[in-house]
Every structure is written in C-alpha cells, then in structure tokens.
Image (cartoon, coloured by chain):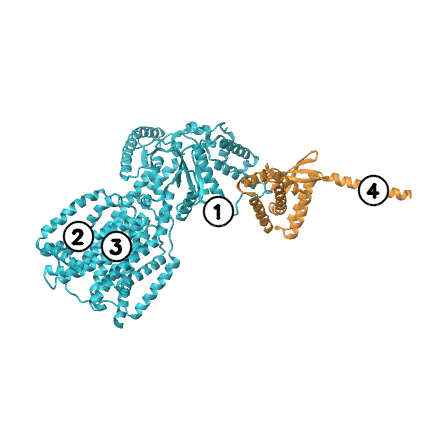
Chain colours: A cyan, B orange
C-alpha cells in the first residue's frame, strides 16, 4: 500500500517538477467546469430541509403543499394624513397587483356586509362559551354571598388561553368597529393583503414577486404623496435569507482575515499563503461542484460549511508546506517534495481520511442537518486531500521557482512541557469537567432562542408596529389537517375534541375550520342559545358597575345586535376568510387548523403536541398533519434521539481507524487521549459558561470528534518516529499543530458573530471545543507521553 | 277554686297573647332587621372573627336562613343528575353555604342598612334594603319563605345578582366540563378553603 502511494506521488511530483505548466493546465482544466457548476448552489433555510424525505411531516408536506400552500403573503402598507390620497394609493396599487399572476388574491376591503350581518355569530362556539363563563364570574364577584366555583385551583393561564383571549379581543374589536378598507383605528395607515397563489419556497421567486409589488407601491407612493412599505411572512422569509447571507459574508470576512493573519505571522511571508490557500480553494471548488447534484440545496446548517471546511482543510496544506520549508533546507526541491510527501503526506492523508470517514458516519443520520453536513464534509475533505496531492506540488514547484517559497531554518525553541504534578492536576480538571457537564449541560428546546436578530433589518420593527395597527398580529398555525368534506370536518373536529377531553395532559388547543363561520344547523342553534344567554347576562343591572369604556360599548353593541336566524353558507363566506380554510388548488378539501395549548416555540411542547396529534385516530380520508410546529417537533425528535448514537458511532469509527493504523490498543488509547480529554473539558466549560446544546450545535460533537483526532495522530506518530522523545516532538509539532487547530478554530470563529443564535451557537461550541482540544493535544498529551517516556 | 281557675286562665291568655305578639313581631322585615343587627353587633366586637364569634355568627344566620332551601333550589336546576347525586350535591353544597356564609359576613361588613320595603305574597316575601358601604349604597334584596310557621331567608339578591341563579349557572357550566365527581371535588375544595380561612 505504502509502495503504491509512493509510486503515485513520486509520479505526480516528477511531472510537477519537470512539466509544471502541463500539470497546472490539467488542474485548471478540471477546476474551471467545476467552478461553473457552483452557480447551481442554493440555500434553503426552511426547517423541513432538515428532515429526511421519508419523515412523516416531510411526506405529508410534499403531498399537501399544493393544496394548503404555505400561508405565504405580502402586506403593503400606506401611511399618510390625507385619507383620500391613501384610498387612491390603495386602489391604484391593488388594481396593479391583481395583474401579478403569482398572487392568488389582493384584499384591501373588508367584507363589511357579511360581517355586519353575522357579527358575533361568527365567533367560534368556545369563544362564546368563554365569554359567557367570564360574564358569570364577573357577576358572581358583585354578590358577596356567591363563591366563584369556575376558577380552577389557582391554575395559571396557559399560553393557548392567552392567545385565545387576544384573538377574541381582536375579533370583537373588528366586528364592533367595522371599516370598509383595511385601515388602522386612526385611519392613517391602510393595508393590502396579498396571498401568493401556491407555496413559494424558492427564495428567488419570492424576491421577484416582491420586486414587482415594490415597483407598484413605490409608484403609488410617489403619485399620491404617501409613505409605503412591504411586510408579511414572505417578506420575513426574505429578511431571514438576507440575514443568513449577511452572516455568511460577515463570517467569511472575519474568518478569512483571521486565517490569513495567522498564516502571515507563521510564514512571515505572503507567497506561502497563496501556496497554502490555492490548492485548498481548488479542492473545495471540486467538492462543492458536486453538492447541487448529489445533495441538493444547502440547509441552515450546511450553508456555513464552506467556511468551516476552509478552516479544516487548510491544516493539510499547512503541514505539507511547513514540512517542505524544513526539508528544502537540506536537499533539492524534488527531493524535499518527495521527503515531505513520503512522511507528512502520509500523516496528512491518514488524518484526513480519519476525519473524512468519521464525518461520513454522520451520513447515517436521518437528520439532514447531520447527514448532509457529514456527506459534504467528507466529500470536501477527500477532494481537498486530492488537491493536496495533485495541485499543491505544482504550486510549491512554481512558487519555489519564482523564489516565492522561503526556506524555513531549523530553529530550536524552548517549549513548554508540563511536569507530573501539572499533568495530574489537568487530569483532575478533566474528570471534574466531565462530572460537571453530566449534571449541568442541558438541551435548549426553545426555538425562540435559536432565531434571528431582527434588529439588523432596517425598519422591521417600525413595519411590524404599523402592520399591527391594521391587521391582528398573526398568531400563525401550528398544524393543518385536511378533510374531504364538511361532514368529515365535523367528524375530525369531534375526534380532536374527544382526544383533548379524554387526556387532561393533551396539548391540543385551539381548533379552527370553516365550520366556525358556516356551522351546521345544530351548532348554529347552540351558538344562538349561547348568544341569548350572553345577552341575558349582560342585560343585568350589575353591568352598570363596569367602568371599562370599551367593554361597556361592546356590551351595548351586543345587546342592540339582532342575531341572524340562519347560519351563512360556505358559498356566502368571503374569500379573505374562506382562503384560510379551503384547499388552494380546488380539490374541495377543507383545512382544519390546530394550535397547541402551550407555547409551541418550546420544543418539548411542540413534540408533545405533535405526538398528541399523531395519536388521534382519524379517518383515512383525513390528510396531514403538516405545519411548522410538526416539522420543528420532528426535527427535534430526530436530533435528540440520534445525536448521541451518531456521536458514539463517529467515535467508534475514529477508534477503529486509529486501531487499524496502529495495530495496538495501547497506542490507539494514547492517540485518543487529547480527543477524549478535550471533549470532556469542552462539555464542562460549555456548561460552566451557561451555554446549552441546541439542534444546531449538536452537529459540532461528531464534527469535533472527526477534527479533534488529527492532532493526536500527528503527535503520537511523530513521537514514535523520534524514539519517544517528547521534547523533540513538542519542538517540532507545537507550531504546525497549533497553526492547524487555530486555523480550524478561525474557520468557525466568524460564526460566533452571526445574528442567527443557532448559527452562533455552532461557532461558540466549535471554538471552545477546538481550543480545549488544542490544550489537550499540546499540553495534556505531552505531559502523559513524558510519563511514558520516563517509565520506558 | 274559681279564683285558681281564673288565675290559670289569665296566665294562659297572657302567654297566648305574648306568643301571638312575639309571632306577629317576626315579620319578614323583622327577621332581616334582627339578624342584621345581631351580625353587626358581632362584627363590631372585633375586626377579625375568632372561633367563638364565628360560632355566634353561624347561629344567628343559621337561625334565619334556610341553607337547605337554597341548595335544594340550585340542585333542582342541574340537569342530568340522578336523585342520589342530587341528594349528595345538595348536602355538600349546603355545608359549603353554611361555612362560607360566616366568612363572607365577617368580610363584607356593611356600615348600616336602610330598610326600604317589605312585600308579602302568601308564604313568600321580599325585603328590600340598601346596604351602606362607606359612601356607596348597594341594593340587597332578601327573599324569604315561611317554613314551619317562621320566615326564613331563602335567597340574597345583591345589585340584581341572584345568588341561586348565579350558582345554578356556575354549576351548569361546571357540569359541561366535569363529571359529577369533579363537581364534588370542587365543592370539597371550596369547603376546605372556607374552613381554613
């Protein structure tokens, strides 16, 4: 094996030395088409891209997205003091927007006639129920002889209760103060709501629609002298995408500058930096050219891989270039190259293969945040290694010929080696760290802690506030089910209510459907009874004691309002309402939306809620559930169930590879010392610093296992080569290993400053981990080896 | 002998007159007035009721209020209960009314009462009063029923809020959410809370 390797590498070195331009031409020939393919790389930040294609939520989403759409919409806002100008701007913009094919509808007027007619009868039955119950309790308060039996035992309001309360308040306000246009209470802000025709996940397509809308609204704004702005959940997606791109650029700049600075300090010259970086870039281009075809769009986690791999891959070039600089002191260019590749080239290949194979174990994971990270990392490492053998020799030759490769004199430096006591203290720290982590390192399930800092987007808060004055701030839908008929809707709702009432711990909360607007005769009758009860209740003398003006006016309005005698038919329901509950592609399916009774951004609630939904026995004709909470829950379930076995499998892979190389248990264990100690310290320090594991940074654990083993492999191999002379090994390897680890750290460092807290948590974890693995490799391991040395 | 007979007759007549006059004095208004006076007197002794005062209060209110009638009225409107459940509910609720009434009267102390009117319709009567709380006047209507020849309070209506009706609405709501055992649990919990007050 060794001989084959030497034959091939000698052949490459031979051509590189004798016909460097030919070799360079060959490298360029492969690289140019690869670079062209990079244009196909896309980033898709949708959480569903983290799920395997066979995941329940992923299958359902694919099947139903045409029917359900993604609830995506744009909102155009106009603000000004002149009502007439605002109306003209709205009318003009709406007329023009209707010409955009990708928009399903353009809503700017409320269906006042419908809402006036049906008003409070459009409130869901459970809201009417709650209103009535609240009124009974208020009434009870007036009479000191009455105890309030309806108050549950000091139970706090659930998140769902609060959402319902807010929703009810907004609905009542809407029904009470109905305006023709979508406008704020003071009439100074007007809005247009435009849902898109089908689920648009392509960020480019969303951008295109937005640009068309913006051109129209800008024109209207200029024409009628009013302010305009665009918001809505499609705009939020664009904002998120922009932040990710900003983070990516910022991280790249920070990491790039720091890596070049460190290389500059190490090489004390500019040209070796080019020799180091160029083959790495070539290797990464080769690898990423294959990504769109074999992997698909990059996801939230893999979007930052290029950066990480740059930091990781640069190690190989550093080791080879440094070794070449040393060897070129002693011999000719070709001989120095041969010596470098026969020795360091093997260690680089071995450590690269170890890292690559370890990371490829991640491909076994169902969680695409892991599997695609593993596939792309392994692919990139193998390609970078290829570039190290194919492209680096020719760059070294060419730069050496043009006097760009400086020889590095053998400098004997004083190096630090810990004594026995220091090593023992470090061992205690390692164990203490592990124990501390075991009890204190926790998983953060809260999605809100893994999101974007919106402040980076100009005007985002201002727009949000203005939108809130016209439209109720959308509370979003956690899960959607589809039923083929209204009868099935009724049956499904009953099944959901039954499941909810049977299990007191069920997190199934608010259930909504077209039936809230077009109820059956029996349900409408029940509503009418409730409305009568409420009317009777608010007609009592006690209501004179109410001081709240809004409530008083609502009560007066309720008493004065005459409920309709029959419910509206589905056909009667205006599109702006119906669109939320009827399939978008005309299959005639009806949507039933379900929200949890507790905060769904807390992953534990999302998982429990999804389990509750999955456990409801529904008719076969019912499709779903789909929705962002279901996807989030499945992502979390995958991460929490797979992380540890993937980490163990990666570790097992690392152990096997090291053992295969060393054929000795003892030697394998020694190689593993810095990795294991470094990981233990990492967990401890991470917990001590108050950081938590998240579904983003969990990927760092197997990545650290793959990356962290390199130092141990190099160090132990060299230690044996120099007859177990720890001082000599330390003197030789301290700088290149430090440089290798520091550059990898720097690759991650840019992510620490990301606005997306999930991404920055990857940066934090990796930088802390690599720093501690550096410490374990170059301080703790030498201490241990020194003890072996003395014993032997 | 005649003298003795005459003495006895006179004594009996006197007793009868006294009895009749005593009976006649306990009109619905008097029942309410006397009990209010007694309650006020107990409350005036201390700002917080001790066990002895609570006992006195319970005796006063208990002697003029028919808890059984109130709880029976509430129970009668609860749909879906078996006769046995109605009986159990009635007993529990009566216990709660008895215990919590003392706390309520200890807590909500009126500064005085204005007795507005008394209406008697057969064996039913209402007494309309105005309870004075600082500067506020709250209408408090007592509904009374003649039980075993004595006027007993069977409902309190404060500012239009009917005690029996509100309780009926509350328990009807509870019955929609809980089963009978759940209702009994709510009652037990409230009884315990009232006892520990």
Residue designated by label 2: A279
Q: Please state the chain letter of the residue tagged with numbered disc 1 in the rendered image.
A: A
Reading the image, the residue beneath label 4 is: B12
Disc 3 is placed on an element classified as helix
Report how far apart the C-alphas of labels 4 and 2 lie in the structure: 129 Å
Quarter the C terminus of chain A occupies: bottom left
Does dot 2 land on a helix, a strand or a loop? helix
Q: Which badge, 3 or 1, comes first in the chain's sequence?
A: 1
Viewer-side residue, A55 vs B122: A55
Residue at x 69% of width, y 44% of height? B63
The circle on residue A437 is none
B82 vs A754: above or below: above
Establish whether labels 2 and 3 are both on one chain.
yes
Quarter of the image holding residue A683? bottom left
Q: Which residue is outermost to the bottom?
A: A791
Q: In 3D space, how far apart are the residues under numbered discs 3 and 4 (Cα atoms)? A: 116 Å
Q: Residues within 10 Å of mark 4 (few under 14, many from 20)?
A: few
Give the alpha-carbon distance from disc 3 to disc 1, as whole Å: 52 Å
Q: Which residue is mark 3?
A: A357
- Closer to the observer: label 4 or label 1? 1
> Dot 1 corresponds to which residue?
A156
Q: Output the chain of dot 4.
A: B
Q: Earlier in the sequence, mark 2 or mark 3?
A: 2
- Percent x, y of residue A302: 28, 48
Respond whether the residues carrying marks 3 and 1 are from the same subunit. yes
Residue under the point 17% across and 61% down: A343
Q: Residue at x 26, y 66 (%)?
A: A782
Label 1 – label 2 distance at C-alpha: 62 Å
Residues packed near mark 2 inside 10 Å, few (<14), some (14 to 19) or many (20 plus):
many
The reply to whether dot 3 and dot 4 touch (C-beta < 8 Å) is no
**Res. A79 visible in picture:** no
Q: Earlier in the sequence, mark 1 or mark 2?
A: 1
């Amino acid at each position: 094996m060794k001989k084959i390797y030497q034959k091939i590498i000698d052949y490459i070195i031979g051509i590189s030395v004798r016909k460097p331009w030919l070799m360079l031409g060959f490298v360029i020939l492969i690289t140019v088409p690869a670079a062209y393919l990079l244009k196909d790389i896309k980033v898709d930040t949708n959480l569903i891209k983290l799920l395997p294609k066979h995941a329940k939520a992923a299958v359902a989403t694919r099947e139903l997205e045409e029917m359900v759409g993604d609830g995506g919409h744009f909102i155009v806002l106009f603000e000004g003091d002149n009502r007439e100008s605002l109306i003209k701007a709205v009318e003009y913009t709406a007329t023009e927007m209707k010409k955009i094919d990708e928009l399903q509808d353009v809503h700017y007027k409320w269906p006042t006639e419908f809402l006036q007619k049906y008003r409070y009868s459009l409130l869901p039955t459970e809201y009417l129920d709650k209103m009535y119950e609240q009124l009974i309790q208020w009434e009870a308060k007036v009479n000191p002889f009455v105890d309030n039996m309806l108050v549950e035992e000091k139970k706090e309001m659930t998140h769902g209760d609060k959402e319902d309360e807010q929703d009810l308040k907004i609905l009542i306000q809407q029904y009470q103060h109905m305006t023709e246009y979508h406008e704020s209470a003071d009439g100074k802000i007007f809005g247009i709501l435009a849902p898109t025709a089908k689920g648009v996940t392509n960020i480019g397509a969303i951008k295109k629609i937005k640009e068309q809308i913006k051109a129209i609204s800008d024109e209207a704004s200029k024409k009628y002298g009013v302010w305009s702005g665009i918001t809505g959940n499609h705009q939020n997606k664009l904002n998120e995408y922009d932040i990710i791109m900003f983070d990516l650029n910022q991280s790249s700049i920070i990491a790039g500058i720091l890596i070049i600075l460190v290389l500059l300090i190490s090489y004390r010259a500019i040209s070796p930096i080019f020799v180091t970086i160029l083959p790495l870039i070539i290797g990464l281009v080769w690898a990423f050219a294959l990504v769109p075809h074999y992997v698909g769009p990059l996801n939230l986690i893999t979007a930052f891989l290029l950066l990480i791999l740059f930091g990781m891959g640069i190690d190989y070039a550093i080791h080879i270039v440094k070794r070449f600089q040393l060897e070129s002191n002693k011999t000719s260019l070709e001989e120095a190259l041969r010596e470098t590749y026969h020795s360091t080239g093997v260690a680089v290949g071995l450590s690269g293969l170890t890292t690559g194979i370890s990371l490829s174990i991640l491909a076994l994971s169902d969680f695409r945040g892991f599997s695609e990270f593993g596939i792309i990392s392994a692919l990139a490492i193998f390609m970078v290694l290829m570039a190290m053998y194919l492209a680096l020799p020719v760059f070294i030759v060419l730069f050496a010929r043009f006097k760009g490769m400086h020889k590095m004199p053998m400098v004997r430096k004083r190096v630090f080696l810990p004594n026995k006591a220091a090593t023992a203290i470090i061992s205690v720290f390692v164990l203490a760290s592990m124990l501390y982590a075991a009890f204190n390192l926790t998983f953060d399930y809260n999605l809100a802690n893994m999101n974007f800092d919106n402040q980076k987007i100009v005007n985002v808060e201002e727009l949000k506030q203005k939108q809130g004055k016209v439209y109720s701030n959308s509370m979003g839908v956690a899960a959607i089910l589809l039923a083929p008929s209204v009868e099935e809707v009724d049956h499904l709702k009953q099944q959901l209510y039954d499941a909810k009432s049977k299990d007191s711990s069920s997190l199934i909360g608010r259930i909504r459907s077209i039936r809230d607007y077009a109820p059956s005769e029996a349900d409408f009758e029940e509503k009418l009874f409730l409305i009568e009860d409420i009317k009777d209740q608010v007609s009592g003398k006690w209501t004179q004691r109410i001081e709240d003006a809004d409530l008083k006016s609502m009560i007066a309005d309720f008493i004065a309002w005459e409920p309709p005698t029959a419910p509206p038919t589905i056909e009667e329901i205006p599109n702006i309402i119906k669109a939320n509950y009827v399939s978008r592609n005309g299959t005639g399916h009806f949507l039933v939306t379900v929200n949890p009774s507790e905060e769904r951004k807390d992953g534990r609630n999302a998982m429990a809620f999804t389990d509750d939904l999955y456990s409801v026995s529904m008719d076969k004709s019912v499709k779903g559930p789909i929705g962002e909470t279901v996807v989030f829950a499945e992502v979390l379930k995958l991460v929490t169930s797979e992380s540890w076995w993937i980490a163990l499998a990666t570790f097992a892979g690392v152990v096997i590879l090291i053992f295969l190389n060393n054929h000795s248990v003892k030697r394998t264990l020694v190689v593993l010392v810095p990795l294991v100690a470094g990981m233990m310290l990492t967990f401890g320090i991470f917990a001590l610093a108050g950081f938590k594991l998240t579904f983003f940074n969990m990927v760092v654990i197997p990545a650290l296992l793959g990356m962290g083993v390199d130092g141990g492999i190099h160090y132990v191999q060299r230690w044996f080569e120099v007859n177990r002379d720890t001082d000599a090994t330390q003197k030789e390897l301290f700088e290149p290993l430090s440089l290798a680890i520091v550059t990898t750290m720097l690759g991650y460092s840019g992510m620490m400053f990301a606005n997306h807290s999930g991404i920055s948590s990857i940066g934090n974890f990796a930088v802390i981990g690599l720093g501690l693995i550096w410490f374990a490799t170059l301080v703790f391991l030498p201490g241990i080896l020194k003890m072996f040395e003395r014993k032997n | 002998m005649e003298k003795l007979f005459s003495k006895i007759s006179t004594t009996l007549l006197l007793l009868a007159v006294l009895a009749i006059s005593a009976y006649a004095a306990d009109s619905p208004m008097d029942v309410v007035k006397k009990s209010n006076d007694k309650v006020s007197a107990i409350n005036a002794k201390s700002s917080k009721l001790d066990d002895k005062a609570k006992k006195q209060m319970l005796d006063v209110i208990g002697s003029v209020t028919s808890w059984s009638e109130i709880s029976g009225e509430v129970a009668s409107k609860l749909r879906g209960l078996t006769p046995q459940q109605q009986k159990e509910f009635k007993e529990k609720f009566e216990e709660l009314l008895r215990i919590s009434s003392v706390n309520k009267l200890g807590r909500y102390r009126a500064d005085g009462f204005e007795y507005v009117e008394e209406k008697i319709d057969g064996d039913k009567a209402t007494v309309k009063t105005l309870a004075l709380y600082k500067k506020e006047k709250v209408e408090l209507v007592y509904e009374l029923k003649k039980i075993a020849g004595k006027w007993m309070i069977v409902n309190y209506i404060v500012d239009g809020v009917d005690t029996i009706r509100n309780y009926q609405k509350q328990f009807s709501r509870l019955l929609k959410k809980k089963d009978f055992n759940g209702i009994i649990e709510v009652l037990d919990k409230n009884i315990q809370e009232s006892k520990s007050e």
